[in-house]
Amino acid sequence: AELELSKTGWLLDITKLKLGKNIGEGEFGAVHEGHYMGQRVAVKTIKCDVTAQAFLQETTVMTKLQHKNLVRLLGVILHKGLHIVTELMTKGNLVNFLRTRGRSVVHSVQLLRFALDVCEGMEYLESKKLIHRDLAARNVLVSDDSVAKVSDFGLTKVDSKESDNAKLPVKWTAPEALKKEKFSTKSDVWSYGVLLWEIFSYGRQPYPKMSLKEVKEKVEGGYRMQAPDDCPPGVYSLMRMCWEPEPRRRPAFHKLREKLEREMGKLSPG
Ligand code: ADP
C-alpha cells in the first residue's frame, strides 16, 4: 500500500507540514490543525502500528472519492506512525455545531441545507456502491462556509470487518445490521434517518434516556422516535421511511434528495 501511495502522489512530505493546535480527539489519536504547502489542513495521527496498516489500506479507497460533501483527503504521511491529512473543517463536527448555536441562531432552512448536504454526499457513495457503516452527526463536519461534509468514510470499514458487535453504534445501526451483520446502502439509509433526527433536534442524543439494550429490543419491536420539536412534518415522514423494518422499502439516497429538495422548496420558495 505504501508503494502504491507514493506512486500516485498521495504520500506527502513531512517537511512541508506545519502542525498547529489540537482540535479534537479521535478514537485512535489526536487531531491537529496545520498547514500543508500554504493550505489549511487537519491532521489525524494514528500511533498504533497495526491500526495504521489497516488505515493505510482504507485511505486507498478515500483517494478515489471526490465530492463537495465528502471531507477531502489530501494524502498521508508516514512518520512515527501514520498521519492522515484532510481539508480543515473549521466549524467542527455537526453535533457540536448545532448544540453550541441552537434554535436562536440556526434556522430550519439551514438545518434542511445540512440534511441535503449529507444526503448528496451519501448519494455519491451510493453511486459508487460504497457503504459508510458509521453515518452519524458526529461524523459530519462543517466547513468555514457552513457546508456539511461526511467524514470517516472508508475508514470505518476497518473495525466492522472484524465484525466486533460490541463496537457497533447501536443507536444508529439498522436492525438487520445489528442482528445479522447485513450492512448495505439501505442500512446507511437507516442511519441517515437517525442523523436527520439529530439535525432537527439540534444535536440531541438519539433515543434520550434509553439504554442500548432497550433501544435494540424496542426498535426490533417496532418502536420509533417521535418527531423533534418543531420538526417539519414532511421531514419527519422521511425519517419514518428511513426506519422501515424492511431494507428494500427504505428510499435510496437519490430519492431522499428529491424529497428533501421539495421540502426546501416549501420553506424557501423561489
Ligand atoms: P474518530 O473517528 O477517530 O473518533 P474523528 O475523525 O471523528 O475521530 O475526529 C475527532 C474530532 O476531531 C471530530 O469530532 C472533529 O471535532 C475533529 N476533526 C476531525 N477531522 C477534522 C477536520 N478535517 N477538520 C476539523 N476538525 C476535525
Image (tube, rainbow, N blue to C red):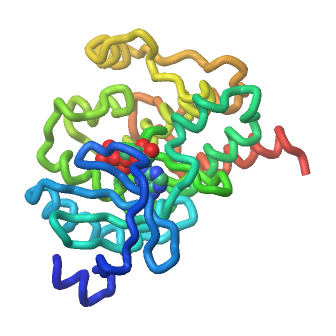
In the picture, measured across the screen, residue 47 lies left or right of residue 201, that is left
Q: Quadrant of residue 163?
A: top left
Task: Residue lying at the far left in this picture: please name it.
Answer: 50
- Can residue 127 be seen by looking at this rendering? no
Residue in the image at 55% along x and 59% along y: 69
Of the pair 261 and 79, the residue shown nearer to us = 79
Q: Nearer the viewer, residue 163 or 2?
A: 2
Instruction: From the viewer's perspective, tell me whether residue 51 is left or right of residue 17.
Output: left
Q: Residue at x 40, y 70 (%)?
A: 18
**Residue 80, x across and y down, in percent:** 15, 66
Instruction: Say above or below: 149 vs 213.
Output: below
* Residue at screen point 57% across, 48% down: 91
Residue 268, compared with residue 108, is above or below; it is below
Q: Position of residue 200 (x, y in %)?
A: 63, 29
Residue 73 image point, x, y percent = 40, 68
Instruction: Name the image quarter holding residue 175.
Output: top left
In this picture, is 210 found above or below 191? above
Q: Residue furthest right?
A: 270
The picture places residue 248, in percent across and down from the top left corner, at 42, 42
Image quadrant in which you'd find residue 56: bottom left
In the displayed structure, 235 sits above or below 73; it is above
The answer to whether residue 243 is seen in the rendering is yes
Could you tell me which residue is drawn at 16 percent across and 76 percent down? 1
